[in-house]
Amino acid sequence: MRIHESLARLRELESPQQLMESAPRELCRACGFTRAMISTVRGSHWVPQVLEVVDGADPDADARRQYLSGNRIQLAHMLLETEMVRRRIPVLMSHPSSDPRTYKPIVDAMESTSYVGAPIVPTDRTIGFFHADRYGQELPVSARDRDNLWVFAEHFGLLYERAVYRGTAGIAQAFAETSVRWHDFQIDIELVRGERPPESAQVPWVREARSRIESLLTVREREVLELMADGSTNTQIAEVLIVSEGTVKSHVKRILRKLHVSNRAEAVARYLHLMARERRMART
């Protein structure tokens, strides 16, 4: 019931940023955690974004937030967070200080004796994850905490996806200027709300939406396009991928040329359209 109530409050928010800022607080309310953190996945790194601490639970909360700020952790092989990204499953970490899969600098800084984590997967890839613990409580986190977090994360992903699509509506004019029709994209948005599109919208080529993107763009170009779709600037993309801003600009130019569009908004619109159409066909 508390998870339902927290998700209902999040449902009233409109922007992805508002959702990200509010989710850790609602997660603590819903599941009884004393600390909860939301992170984003940027290319091959995970980046802590917001740490919520229940009042009085952790006297060093401000220092921990300061430590987390600006951290960018490589998603290395065998790291637990890497497993969450790849396998899209929740985790329960009972002994983080001794387990070789944990990222020890953050484990030491947070002084967590146990924690749970879950990926955020609104589309076909993991865009971030939650971490939560019961710091200062007598009992450690449990398998039930892991399962509750997984439920929360799954529903949060849907809310986040809806907020992204709402924001994309502001570039409707870009659709009108490309080969992708705004009317078609509206159909995909409605699908997120559970409605079935008319049969006339189900053209054959949509079944190869992802393969079309993969055949058109290189792996690095797809990484750049995904970051563009997340709203990242060229400077931010350069920081995430550890390349120069000039290199990012070159990638963007090639992406525009290959997608036959004239600006970033059109490229993002076409990418979201193809991905949404693919998800729609996967549900049929």
Image (cartoon, helix red, strand yellow):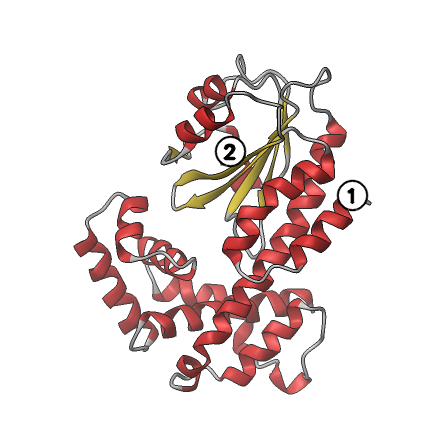
Q: Name the residue at 68% across, 41% down.
A: 150
Please tell me whether mark 2 sits on a helix, a strand or a loop: helix
Give yes or no for contact between labels 1 and 2 (Cβ–Cβ under 8 Å): no
Please tell me whether mark 1 sits on a helix, a strand or a loop: helix
Residue 32 percent coordinates (x, y): 72, 32
For this view, does 49 lie left or right of residue 3?
left
Which mark's residue is nearer the viewer, 1 or 2? 1
Residue 190 percent coordinates (x, y): 65, 74
Disc 1 packing (10 Å; few <14; some 14–19; many ≥20): few
Residue that protrudes farthest toward the left in the picture: 246
The front one of 14 and 160 is 14
Disc 1 marks a residue whose amino acid type is: Arg
Q: Name the residue at 45% across, 31% down.
A: 65
Disc 2 packing (10 Å; few <14; some 14–19; many ≥20): many
Residue 178 percent coordinates (x, y): 39, 83
Residue at the disc numbered 2: 81
Disc 2 marks a residue whose amino acid type is: Glu
Picture quarter with the C terminus: bottom right
Disc number placed over residue 2 in the picture, else none: 1
Q: Name the residue at 57% across, 52% down.
A: 19
Q: Name the residue at 32% across, 77% down.
A: 261
Residue 57, placed above or below residue 281: above
Residue 174 percent coordinates (x, y): 40, 80
Residue 48, placed above or below residue 260: above
